[in-house]
Image (tube, rainbow, N blue to C red):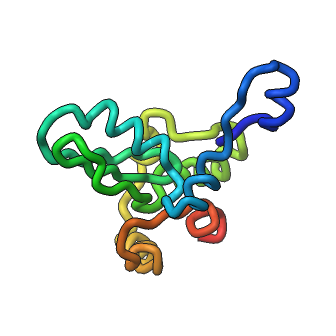
Amino acid sequence: MQIGEPSYLSAESGAIVVSDFRAADIALGGQGAPIATYFHKQIFGKVKKTISVHNLGGISNLSLIQNCELIQGFDTGPANMLIDMAIKIYSKEKKQFDKNGNWARQGNINLKLVNKMLAHKYFKIKPPKSCGREEFGEIF
């Protein structure tokens, strides 16, 4: 999430403000999450091994690092944003997320619904790929 208007922040603070990484990365042929993959490479890419880092935020993304080099980074689909939306609805906006998974633990897996969700066209696209609320927001 980007908070604040970058031009205003720069004008008011006198500081250089760098923003909108997603749009810039996509314009340059990337998949819109250059900071996550860069961070993963810096933290986990110091060994001569194959490492996969799967970040579960609102949207989940994966970074594949081999022998200290980032091979590929892409979004794998929705993660916490779906449960966060459900929590907001069922708590009538009193809660924003499922702290410690307490609500999720009380439920049962609905395999019919899971299979319907996994039939979404996004999961058939080969990486690299990116997604967002456009695919996996309220309409989904």
Which residue, as the protein is rendered here, is positioned at the far left?
Answer: 48
Q: Residue at x 60, y 61 (%)?
A: 27
| Total tally of numbered discs in the picture | 0
Residue 137 shown left or right of residue 40 in the figure: right
Q: Residue at x 64, y 38 (%)?
A: 95
42 or 93, which is in the foreground?
42
Q: Residue at x 46, y 74 (%)?
A: 122
126 or 133, which is in the foreground?
126
8 or 57, which is in the foreground?
8
Q: Residue 78 in the image: state x and y as whole percent.
A: 48, 59
Q: Residue 135 in the image: state x and y as whole percent.
A: 58, 69
Relative to 85, residue 41 above or below = above
Residue 74 shown left or right of residue 58 in the figure: left
- Quadrant of res 132: bottom right
Which image quarter holds the C terminus? Answer: bottom right
Q: Residue 119 in the image: state x and y as whole percent.
A: 41, 80
- Quadrant of res 73: bottom left
Q: Residue at x 22, y 40 (%)?
A: 68
Q: Residue 5 in the image: state x and y as whole percent.
A: 81, 37
Relative to 113, residue 83 above or below = above
